Image: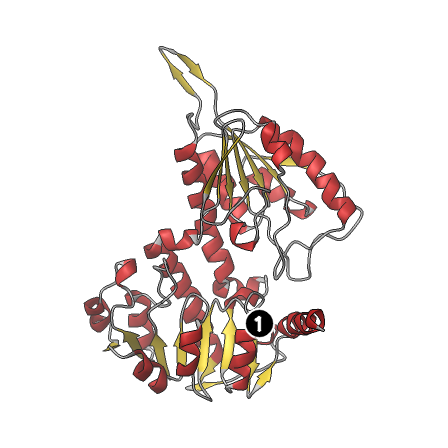
Amino acid sequence: MKIAVTKEIEVGERRIALIPDMVSRLVKQGWEIYVESGAGEAGYFSDSAYEQAGATIVSDKAELWQNADIITKVSSLKEEELPLLQKGKSIIGLLDPLGQPETIQKLADQGVTSFSLELMPRTSRAQSMDALSSQGNIAGYKSVLIAATALPKFFPMLTTAAGTIRPASVFIIGVGVAGLQAIATARRLGALVEAFDIRPEVKEQVQSLGADFVEMDLEEDTTTSDGYAKEVSKDSKQKSQELIAKHVAKADVVITTAQVQGKRAPQLVTNEMIKQMKPGSVIVDLAGEQGGNCEPTEAGKDIQMEPGVTVISPINLPSSLPIHASQMYSKNISTLLQYLVKEEQMQLDFDDDIINSICLTHNGELRSQKVQEILAAKTESKV
C-alpha cells in the first residue's frame, strides 16, 4: 500500500501525521511511504530525516495525493483540498465530521473512503488508535502551564525566610483525558486541586491523582455508550452551575474542559460567577472552539474581566508541542493503518465496532449516522 503524508495547510497547525521514526518502522514492514516536501518542518522533522527513514519526498501535492492509496493528515480538509481526492482513494485524519458535515457529504459524492479519528470508540481495544485521548493529554498539560504563567502567584506552597506562601487553588471542570492530565500537572506543580464532572464514575480517577472530587447527584444518565459526557437537561445544568459557582469563587485558577460531541460546549461559568472570583485569578477555557464553557470566552483571545480575572481560550494546544503531539498522533495513525490493511489490501469489516464507528464514507455512501442526522437537521431548519 502506498501511504501519503501531506503537509497541513491549516493556519498554525504544526503537527504531522507520521514522524520519521514511525515511517522507518512501516517501511521495514513493506509499506511505501511518500511525504510532501516540507510537511514536517513546522514540527522539526526535516525532509532528510524522512529520506533516511526510507520515505520518498514528493514536492507536488496533487501528484502525492494522486499516486497514493491512503492519504494521512492531521487537521480537517479544506475546500481547496477536495478536488485532489479521486474516486477510490482513502483518507484518514481528524476530519471534524460533526462540525463540517457538508465536507463529508462531498467525500461520499466523490467516491472517497474516509476515516475520522474523532469517532474512535472509547474502548480498551481502540485505545492505541484514540487520537482524541492522545491529543487531549497534551491540551490538559499545556493548559496548566498557561495558567501558571498567567497567575500572579506561585502554584506550590513555599516556606521562606519572608514567610509561608499558601499553594494555589485549582478547580478543573470536566474530567476527561484533558481534565485528568490537568489535574496531574497541577498537582505536580504543587497546587491544591478540586475537580467536577457530571459523570460520577470518574470520582475514583480524580482521587487517585490526589485531587478532591466535587460530587453532585443527578437523576439522569450522564454518560454515552462510548464513554463521553451526555448533554443533560436544563434542570441538571442549573444544579451544576449552582455547585460550580461555589468552587469557582474560591479558586485561583479554573480550567474548563467540558465538551459534547457535535454540539455547542455547555456554558458552565457565567459572568456573575467570574465577578465573585479573587482579583488576579485565571480561567483557561479549553472548549473555546466549541463556543466555550465560560460566558465571556472568545476562541483564541485573552479577555480581561472585572474584578481583574483573565479568561484565556487557547486554540489547538497540541500543535504548540508539535514534536510529542506528532509522535503520539503518529502512533495512533500507524496502528490504525495496520488494523485496516491486511495482506496489502484494505479490509473493511463493518461488523467491527472500530471500523464501523470511524468509517464516514465508502463506495459513494455516507455511512455515518451522526453526520446524516446533522445534515438532515440543517435541511429541516432551512425549510
Q: Is residue 212 above or below residue 258?
A: above
Splitting the image into 4 quarters, where does residue 205 fall? top right
Q: Is residue 164 above or below residue 192?
A: above
Q: Position of residue 238 (x, y in %)?
A: 74, 41
Label total for image: 1
Taking the spot 33% from the left edge, 69% from the top edge, the residue there is 7
Q: Position of residue 85 (x, y in %)?
A: 42, 83
State the SS at label 1. helix
Question: Which quadrant is the N terminus positioned in?
Answer: bottom left
Taking the spot 28% from the left edge, 67% from the top edge, the residue there is 20
Question: Which quadrant is the C terminus positioned in?
Answer: bottom right
Callout 1, which amino acid? Pro
Question: Quick one: 59 or 338, which is closer to the camera?
Answer: 59
Q: Is residue 4 left or right of residue 101?
A: left
Q: Position of residue 48 (x, y in %)?
A: 19, 68
The residue that label 1 is drawn on is 101
Splitting the image into 4 quarters, where does residue 337 fall? bottom left
Q: Position of residue 254 (x, y in %)?
A: 54, 36
Q: Is residue 230 left or right of residue 41?
A: right
Taking the spot 27% from the left edge, 79% from the top edge, the residue there is 60
